[in-house]
Image (cartoon, grey):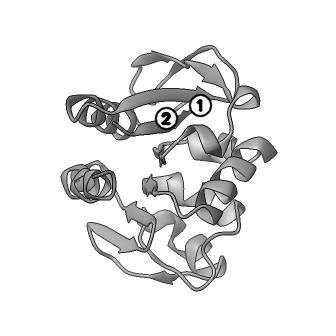
């Protein structure tokens, strides 16, 4: 059983948070919803979720992987230094980091994309390239410990790759 952090913040893309959460639970992994604060957040489409813990009370050593959903949440997550430190430390430890859609913004702000290959939602393609990554327009791109996808339609491929990394 792996311990997986799923980042959450207001206006997360509902499917990109909930689909990974439930697929991970189905595979008998422990999921912890990590928010900027330990409060209830509402997704872009109105679905509420409750953060299990605040970013202030976690460290990379507690988790085996991290999921960064898209939506508008990454624009808020990337402004928090503790979020960026957590993602950078997970990367340093070579633990799986799975980011979908606008989740790539957090990767860019954590400075972990230079020399990597990644994909993302087309609207942030230039941000990913400017952060030093080679962009590929594909459902899922795996580069070492980094797993990236573009949109909710890519969730099946995204989760197949994350679950492989957790075996």
Q: Position of residue 156 (x, y in %)?
A: 19, 51
96 above or below 77?
Answer: below
Element type at marker 2?
A: loop
What residue would you read off at disc 2? 12
For residue 148, what is the image quadrant?
bottom left
Q: Position of residue 104 (x, y in %)?
A: 53, 60
Q: On the rendered structure, is 95 left or right of 105? A: left
57 above or below 83?
Answer: above
Q: Position of residue 136 (x, y in %)?
A: 37, 81
Label number found at residue 9: 1
Element type at marker 1?
A: loop
Q: Could one spot residue 7 in this view of the protein?
A: yes
64 above or below 24?
Answer: below
Q: On the rendered structure, is 32 left or right of 60? A: left
Q: Are marks 1 and 2 in contact (CB under 8 Å)?
A: yes
Front residue of 113 and 163: 163
Q: Could one spot residue 80 in this view of the protein?
A: no
Residue at horizontal 55 percent and vertical 42 percent from the top: 72
Residue at horizontal 60 percent and vertical 62 percent from the top: 91
Q: Dividing the image into 4 quarters, which one contains the N terminus?
A: top left
> How far apart in space, not on screen, are marks 1 and 2 (Cα)?
6 Å
The crowd level at tag 2 (other Cα within 10 Å; few <14, some 14-19, many 20+) is many
Q: On the rendered structure, is 9 left or right of 100? A: right
Q: Position of residue 24 (x, y in %)?
A: 29, 36
Residue at horizontal 65 percent and vertical 80 percent from the top: 130
């Amino acid at each position: 059983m792996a311990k997986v952090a799923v980042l959450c913040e207001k206006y997360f893309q509902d499917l990109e948070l909930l689909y990974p959460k439930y697929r991970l639970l189905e595979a008998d992994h422990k999921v912890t919803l990590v928010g900027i604060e330990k409060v209830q957040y509402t997704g872009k489409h109105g679905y509420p979720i409750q953060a299990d813990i605040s970013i202030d009370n976690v460290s990379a050593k507690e988790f085996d992987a991290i999921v960064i959903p898209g939506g508008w949440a990454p624009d808020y997550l990337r402004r928090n230094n503790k979020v960026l430190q957590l993602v950078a430390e997970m990367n340093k430890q070579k633990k799986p980091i799975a980011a979908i859609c606008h989740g790539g913004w957090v990767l860019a702000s954590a400075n972990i994309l230079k020399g990597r290959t990644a994909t993302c939602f087309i609207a942030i393609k230039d941000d990913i390239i400017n952060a030093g990554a080679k962009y590929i327009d594909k459902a899922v791109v795996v580069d070492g410990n980094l797993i990236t996808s573009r949109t909710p339609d890519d969730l099946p491929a995204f989760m197949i790759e994350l679950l492989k990394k957790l075996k």
